[in-house]
């Protein structure tokens, strides 16, 4: 059994095993659908090199991981390390569509309206210190 098949699980992700992991599968899927998802990277070592991918753009980073008990893709949209939106989807093409839309400049509100499986993460603002 290959490292990729051990890390990914042939039963849930046979297509990703065949392509050598999540990052190469995302690159191929985006190209097949004519989507510009930016630079795609994966960790260089360990299991995560097969199970995680980051799609980089000027807008921020789309981080993608895999479900371990069922087949789905977990998406986080991050700007300066802060998660602005997240969602889960079962179709890899939809992951590429989200990344391409984010790269094209859609706002979080536009993104969550276009992709109902994405949810905006509301952040509480820090309390303002009272000056006496």
Image: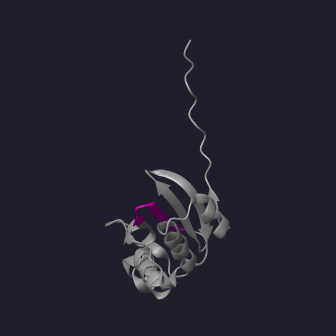
Residue positioned 65% across, 69% down in the render: 114
**Residue 57 is one of the magenta-drawn residues:** yes
Estimate the x, y position of residue 82 in percent, counting from the top left: 49, 50
Looking at the rendering, which quadrant does residue 23 occupy? bottom left
Vertical placement of residue 120 versus 5, above or below: above
Estimate the x, y position of residue 131 in percent, counting from the top left: 54, 16
Looking at the rendering, which quadrant does residue 132 occupy? top right
Magenta-drawn segment: 56-66
Vertical placement of residue 95 versus 83, above or below: below
Vertical placement of residue 46 versus 71, above or below: above
Q: Between 61 and 109, which is closer to the camera in this rendering?
A: 109
Q: Is residue 39 left or right of residue 101?
A: left
Q: Is residue 123 left or right of residue 17?
A: right
Q: Between 131 and 115, which is closer to the camera in this rendering?
A: 131
Q: Quadrant of the N terminus?
A: bottom left
Estimate the x, y position of residue 8 in percent, counting from the top left: 47, 75
Q: Between 19 and 1, which is closer to the camera in this rendering?
A: 19
Residue 47 visible in the picture: no
**Residue 62 is one of the magenta-drawn residues:** yes
Q: Is the stretch drawn in magenta largely helix, strand or loop? A: strand
Vertical placement of residue 8 versus 132, above or below: below
Residue sitting farthest toward the top? 132
Residue 104 visible in the picture: yes
Residue positioned 58% across, 59% down in the render: 108
Estimate the x, y position of residue 76 in percent, counting from the top left: 53, 60
Colour setting: one colour
Residue sitting farthest toward the front? 105
């Amino acid at each position: 059994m290959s490292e990729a098949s051990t890390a990914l699980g042939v039963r849930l992700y046979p297509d990703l095993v065949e392509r050598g992991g999540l990052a190469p599968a995302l690159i191929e899927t985006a190209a097949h659908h004519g989507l510009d998802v930016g630079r795609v990277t994966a960790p260089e070592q360990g299991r995560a090199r097969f199970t995680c991918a980051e799609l980089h753009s000027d807008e921020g980073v789309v981080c993608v991981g895999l479900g371990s008990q069922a087949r789905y893709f977990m998406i986080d949209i991050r700007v300066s390390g802060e998660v602005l939106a997240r969602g889960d989807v079962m179709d890899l093409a939809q992951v590429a569509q989200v990344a391409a839309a984010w790269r094209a400049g859609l706002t979080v509100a536009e993104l969550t309206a276009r992709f109902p499986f994405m949810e905006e993460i509301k952040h509480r603002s820090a309390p303002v210190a009272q000056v006496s």
